[in-house]
Image (spheres, rainbow, N blue to C red):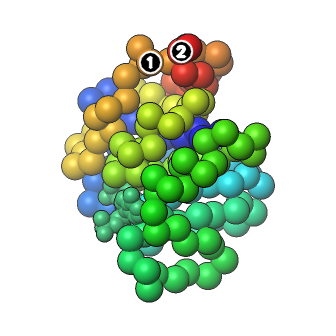
């Protein structure tokens, strides 16, 4: 099964200059809780710009560069092939961005972990294809700076 995890402001902005536009401690804690000891998948840009190493997760980095290598991660050169191979697995693969990876993976995702950031931020990267209407909300928790929702794709 393919799912995704994202934090997004009201205009669907998710990033600026290669980083997150915000620093939300509770959101980072949630991301950790949701991904710990799971398979996570992220684009090379997102991976290379992580402020610190993500431990205790099985990480796949997507890059079209056949020479790309990084310690302790699997590298996948063809995202679509990867998604087709795993979309019906019982094991969950959580797409963790960035924008180009969310966009391509969106049609394959059956579940989502989304933090809807309440304030508007300056962003240069958006998750434009995301539509809340595509999803049923199965869990909702209100935090001071964001609303966290777990979503399953409508039949
Ligand atoms: N708010 C959030 O929850 C969140 C989460 C993650 C990231 N972000 C933000 O998103 C931004 C980064 O997004 P981005 O779109 O620039 O980069 P990205 O999606 O992280 O990475 C793109 C990388 O993936 C490669 N790639 C794209 N499609 C591929 C495919 N089909 N097969 C193999 N490789 C493929 C690209 O290669 P080429 O360059 O050669 O095309 C590029 O190296 C940052 O600002 C980051 O902070 C936000």
Name the side, left or right, on which 127 lies relative to 88. left
Write the residue at 55% across / 47% down. Answer: 84
Ligand 1 neighbours mark 2 (CB distance < 8 Å): no
- Please tell me how crowded label 2 is: few (under 14), some (14-19), or many (20+) other residues with Cα within 10 Å: few
Q: Please provide percent x and percent y for residue 104.
A: 38, 45
Tags 2 and 1 touching, CB below 8 Å: yes
- Please tell me how crowded label 1 is: few (under 14), some (14-19), or many (20+) other residues with Cα within 10 Å: few
> Where does the C terminus fall, quadrant-wise?
top right
Nearest the eye: 45 or 60:
60
Write the residue at 39% across / 77% down. Answer: 65
Q: Is residue 63 above or below residue 149?
A: below
Residue ID for mark 1: 134
Q: Please provide percent x and percent y for residue 96.
A: 52, 50
Secondary structure under the numbered disc 2 in the rendered image: loop
Residue ID for mark 2: 154
Total numbered labels placed on residues in the image: 2
Give the spatial CA distance, label 2 vs label 1: 6 Å
Name the side, left or right, on which 46 lies relative to 70. left
Write the residue at 75% across / 63% down. Answer: 56
> Where does the N terminus fall, quadrant-wise?
top right
Q: Is residue 76 above or below residue 83?
A: below
- Which comes before the other along the chain, label 2 or label 1? 1
> Which quarter of the frame holds ligand 1?
bottom left
Q: Is residue 63 above or below residue 82?
A: below
């Amino acid at each position: 099964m393919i799912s995704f995890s994202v934090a997004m402001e009201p205009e669907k902005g998710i990033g600026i200059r290669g980083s997150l536009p915000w620093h939300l401690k509770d959101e980072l804690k949630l991301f950790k809780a949701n991904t710990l000891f799971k398979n996570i998948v992220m684009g090379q840009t997102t991976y290379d710009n992580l402020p610190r190493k993500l431990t205790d997760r099985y990480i796949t980095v997507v890059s079209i560069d056949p020479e790309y290598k990084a310690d302790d991660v699997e590298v996948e050169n063809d995202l679509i092939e990867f998604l087709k191979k795993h979309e019906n697995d019982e094991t969950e693969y959580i797409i963790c961005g960035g924008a180009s990876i969310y966009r391509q993976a969106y049609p394959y995702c059956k579940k989502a972990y989304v933090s809807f950031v309440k304030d508007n931020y300056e962003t240069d990267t958006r998750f434009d294809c995301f539509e809340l209407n595509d999803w049923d909300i199965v869990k909702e928790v209100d935090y001071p700076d964001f609303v966290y929702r777990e979503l399953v794709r409508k039949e």
